[in-house]
Image (spheres, helix red, strand yellow):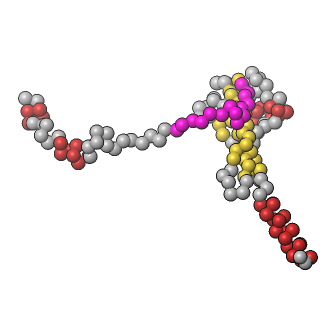
Amino acid sequence: MTRRGAFALALCAALAASGCTAIYRNHGYVPTEDDLALVEVGTSTRQDVATAVGRPSSSGLLEGSGWYYVGSRWKHYGARAPEEIDRQVVAISFDEGGTVSNVERFGLADGEVVALSRRVTESNVKGIGLIRQLLGNFGRVNASQILNR
C-alpha cells in the first residue's frame, strides 16, 4: 500500500470513528447549591429570589404557586433518538404574601409519567348517526305534548 493510500485509509477510519461519538447537549437552567443558599425559607421574597437565582423559565398556573427551574442533559448518538440522561428540577414555592415557603430539588428518578386526557367528545354515543337521531324523533312527539293538553 502506498503512503497516500495509508493516509486516506487512516483519515476515513478517523472520520468513521468520530461519527460514532456521542454528543451531549444541555437544555434549561438550574441554579447551583451556592445560589440556592442565598434563598432563605420564611424570609426571602420573590424579588430576593429573582436577584439571587434569576427568574425561571416557567412558573405555576396559580399566582402564589411557585417558580420552577428545569435543566436537562440529552445524549445524541448517531441516528438513534436522543436520550435524556439527567434532569434536575428546582421548585421554589411561595405563600400568599410572596415569601418563600419551600425549596425542593427533584431528579430524573423522581419524575412520573403523566397521562394527559385527549378531551375528545364522542360524536356517536349510542352508535346512531346525527340524521338518524333527528329523524327518529318524528314518531315520538304528538301534538298534545306540545300544547300541554
Q: Residue furthest top?
A: 42
Magenta run includes residue 115: yes
Of residue 124 and residue 103, the one placed in the foreground of this image is 124
The reply, left or right, for residue 110 in relation to residue 132 is right
- Residue 89, position as x, y percentages in the image: 71, 35
Q: For the point 52% across and 38% down, which residue is it?
A: 116
Of residue 55 and residue 69, the one placed in the foreground of this image is 69
Residue 118's place in the image compared with 94, above or below, is below
Could one spot residue 57 in this view of the protein? yes
Q: Which quadrant is the N terminus positioned in?
A: bottom right
Residue 71's place in the image compared with 21, above or below, is above
Where, by quadrant of the figure, is residue 19 drawn?
Answer: bottom right
Of residue 46 and residue 113, the one placed in the foreground of this image is 113
Where, by quadrant of the figure, is residue 42 drawn?
Answer: top right
Q: Which quadrant is the C terminus positioned in?
A: top left
Count of numbered circles on the image: 0
Of residue 40 and residue 69, the one placed in the foreground of this image is 69
Q: For the point 84% across and 64% down, which residue is it?
A: 14
- Residue 125, position as x, y percentages in the image: 31, 39
- Residue 79, position as x, y percentages in the image: 68, 57
Q: For the point 72% across and 57% down, which residue is it?
A: 78
Which residues fall within the magenta stretch? 102-116
Where, by quadrant of the figure, is residue 5 drawn?
Answer: bottom right
Could one spot residue 47 in this view of the protein? no
Q: For the point 22% across and 43% down, which residue is it?
A: 133
The reply, left or right, for residue 136 in relation to residue 75 is left
Residue 97's place in the image compared with 51, above or below, is above
Q: Residue furthest right?
A: 3
- Residue 17, position as x, y percentages in the image: 81, 60
